Amino acid sequence: MAKIGKRYAAFQTHVDAAKRYSIDEGLGLIPAVATAKFDESVDVAVRLGVNPRQADQMVRGSVSLPHGVGKNVRVLVFAEGDAAEAAREAGAEFVGSDDIVNKIQKEGWVDFDKAVAVRSMMAKVGRLGRVLGPRGLMPNPKDGSVVGPEDIARVVREVKAGRVDFRVERAGIVHASVGKASMSADELRDNVLALIRELVRLKPASAKGTYVRGITVSTTMGPGIRLDSNETVRLAQESR
């Protein structure tokens, strides 16, 4: 018989794996399960009633979380000229063109959290797909990370403030970070509801049956806490 570790056994005293908690109950358990020696991330997994293999059922987008993600987001911007200067003024940590492209290509440098590009740069940035793509760092117009030069400052500010990009995976699940364990339950609640509200807004017209089929919250090292999806969706829609 497999042994149950002390850490897992401790979690079992706090979280009932068979229960679907209200959002307030579920998020209220975060302090009890976030026992690592670092500030754990709080992540949400949402199981959707879609088939991502169908082009018209792909769910992808971004949402600006009301209270950010609880950490400094290091932003890289591919831009030149006035757009590059606007990106720096908006707070981007790294701004460049050929120099940054070459650094990523030759050195495999990926010491940043989010990449944004001006449309005119995509011919060069496109060569970085093999490096940035698997890491989820490739700029994409579908999630708003490829924009015109007039929008670059706004996008950088949004990303720095806590904009989160998401995309449904093959199994029909969306994963997103909604903050840190050190944040208050009210802050995490607002962030979770903002994410769910945006997912509901993006529901494909061709999706049939129940759309939001399950919502699970977890910390980096903690167990999954299943939420009552019906209640959470209702509260998300009411909090518009």
Image: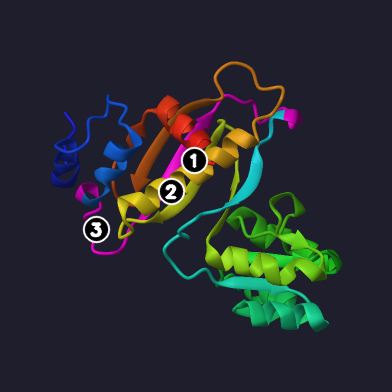
Callout 2, which amino acid?
A: Asp
Q: Is residue 177 above or below residue 16?
A: below
Q: Which residue is mark 2?
A: 190
Dot 3: what SS? Answer: loop
Cβ–Cβ under 8 Å for marks 1 and 3: no
Asked whether residue 33 is drawn in magenta, I would say yes
The nearer-to-camera label among 3 and 2 is 2
Q: Which mark is residue 36?
A: 3
Q: Is residue 105 visible?
A: no
| Residue 239, numbered label | 1
Q: CA distance from mark 3 to mark 2?
A: 24 Å
Question: Residue 236: x and y, percent?
Answer: 49, 37
Which amino acid type is marked by label 1?
Ser
Image quadrant for the N terminus?
top left
Foreground disc of the pair 2, 1:
1
Q: In the visual, does 14 lie left or right of 174? A: left
Task: Calculate the distance from the C-alpha at mark 2 to the C-alpha at mark 1.
Answer: 9 Å
Q: Indicate the amino acid at tag 3.
A: Ala
Percent of width and height locating residue 72:
47, 70
Which percent across, then down, holds residue 124?
82, 68
